[in-house]
Image: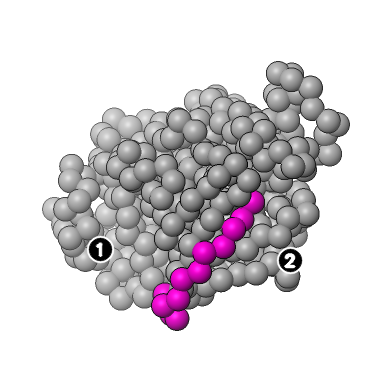
Amino acid sequence: MGVSGIATATRLHAAGWTPVIVERSAERRRGGYFVGLFEAGLIAADRLGILSHLHDRNPYSLSYLVDRSGRNFRTFSMKDLPGRPWLMLRGDVEQATFAALPADVEVRYSTVPTSIVQDDDGVDVTLANSVTGQSVTERFDLVVGADGLRSTVRSLVFGPHKQYLHRLGYMVAAFEFPGTPAGLEPGVSVQLVEPDRAMWVFAFADHDPTIMISYRTDDVDAEFTYRAADRIREVFADQPLGATLSDVLDALDHAEHVLFDSAEQVHLNTWHQGRVLLLGDSAWSVTLYAGMGVSAGLIGADLLGELLERHPGDVPTALSEWEQGLRPYIEEYQAVGLKQRAFFVPDALRQIRVRRAMSVVTRFALGRRLLSKALEGAVEARTTDITAKALQRLRSSHPLPAARV
Ligand SMILES: Cc1cc2nc3c(=O)[nH]c(=O)nc-3n(C[C@H](O)[C@H](O)[C@H](O)COP(=O)(O)OP(=O)(O)OC[C@H]3O[C@@H](n4cnc5c(N)ncnc54)[C@H](O)[C@@H]3O)c2cc1C
């Protein structure tokens, strides 16, 4: 029941399949952290029937670089990045995707797969319900593992996590802030960036802001032995906090839902084996630093439906063309995730000074073009209709039936 899973079920239903969604949690997650949905994701959302359930929560995004003493400096925002993202909460996209899900799609909560065994004609999946304690084995034509970074489908079919997870050496915490942090104006986003640590306030016009904190670590395992709020206080403890950071850390102390995790990418040589496919963070986690994880899940779902429609009765061909068409774009998002990490958490003071200089330059149209140029590798992948591009790419390598998009 993440964005990737619900979108896939919606698209496969439209292609004539009968999807069953399996979700470990007892209910759907809500709210959460800030996400930007870039043009490529907006195009996929539109085609999946999701876009009409979404709106940009911060269309006139205003952003400042701040320091602990409260000094501030107007800077460029996410809105200035190529791909003109709509800004919202992760839960908004999930809610919108759920709204587009046909009512007759079966959803099983509190359920996890415990065994996946396949042959040429189908897949036997054992599903365990954590409430009733019952297990059943059922046969499916296709299994899509859209179960996130630490995917159970991946570990059951492809092998243990450690073979595929690549830690970036950074921790991430995210939560909703009730009201407006001290020293800030409502609706204004700020970036408090220091070498190896950063605190971002993502403001919205019609919702409380969300906070994102990220910092470098040499020992990811040790990070998980702390309570998030205590560890983060320690990370920022070497200087007086200042009003805004102090208020944010107090809120973190009392926050009900805090995401606290390490930033990790997933790298696999193939995203499918027989009739089992991985899609979304389970297959390719690009990390928050790429800003494309949600979009990639929507694009993956859209293209999958398209190719299953084009190859009725031939799942293996549909899956291998899906991967062939999609992989170049996902690899680009992963590269952006690595490159753009320093935008969110700089390594050195020098980068912060460059950002200040860029902040002045990007007040002008030419400067914004320079910023786009600096991020050039990602422009096309963020802004175009990836499904159409991927189908074009496949058509040029071998003829396909006429395109529907
Ligand atoms: C702080 C932060 C900021 C981000 N910012 C952006 C952004 O600006 N733009 C962007 O596009 N992306 C952003 N991302 C990334 C984006 O949120 C993810 O890439 C995306 O949500 C992944 O969706 P998914 O559906 O593939 O996986 P998930 O959201 O992880 O969903 C997986 C689902 O599977 C369920 N599940 C897990 N295990 C099992 C199991 N064993 N059995 C059954 N169900 C199971 C989970 O409960 C969950 O419902 C950000 C991420 C973070 C953490």
Marks 2 and 1: CB-CB under 8 Å? no
Foreground tag (2 vs 1): 2
Q: Is residue 138 magenta?
A: yes
Q: Residues within 10 Å of mark 1 (few under 14, many from 20)?
A: many
**Residue under label 1:** 228
Q: Residues within 10 Å of mark 2 (few under 14, many from 20)?
A: few
Residue 192, relative to residue 311: is it above or below? below
Task: Return the x and y of residue 60 as percentages of the image width and height.
Answer: 61, 53
Quarter of the view holding residue 344 = top left
What quarter of the picture does the N terminus occupy? bottom right
What quarter of the picture does the C terminus occupy? top right
The CB of the residue at mark 2 lies under 8 Å from ligand 1: no
Identify the mark nearer the N-term, 2 or 1.
Answer: 2
Task: Return the x and y of residue 351 as percentages of the image width and height.
Answer: 33, 32
Which residue is located at x 48 percent, y 62 percent?
126
Residue 29 visible in this rendered orientation of the protein: no
Which residue is located at x 71 percent, y 53 percent?
11
Q: Nearer the viewer, residue 221 or 312?
A: 312
Which residue is located at x 32 percent, y 65 percent?
248
Check the image and name the residue furthest to the left. 238
Q: Is residue 25 left or right of residue 397?
A: left
Which residue is located at x 51 percent, y 58 percent?
125
Q: Amino acid at mark 2?
A: Pro
Residue 225 visible in this rendered orientation of the protein: yes
Q: Amino acid at mark 1?
A: Ala
Q: Is residue 121 magenta?
A: no
Q: Label 2, label 1: how many angstroms apart (C-alpha)?
A: 38 Å
Q: Nearer the viewer, residue 137 or 234?
A: 137
**Residue under label 2:** 102
Task: Return the x and y of residue 167 as percentages of the image width and height.
Answer: 30, 41
Q: Which residues are magenta?
A: 130-141
In what element is the residue under mark 1?
A: helix
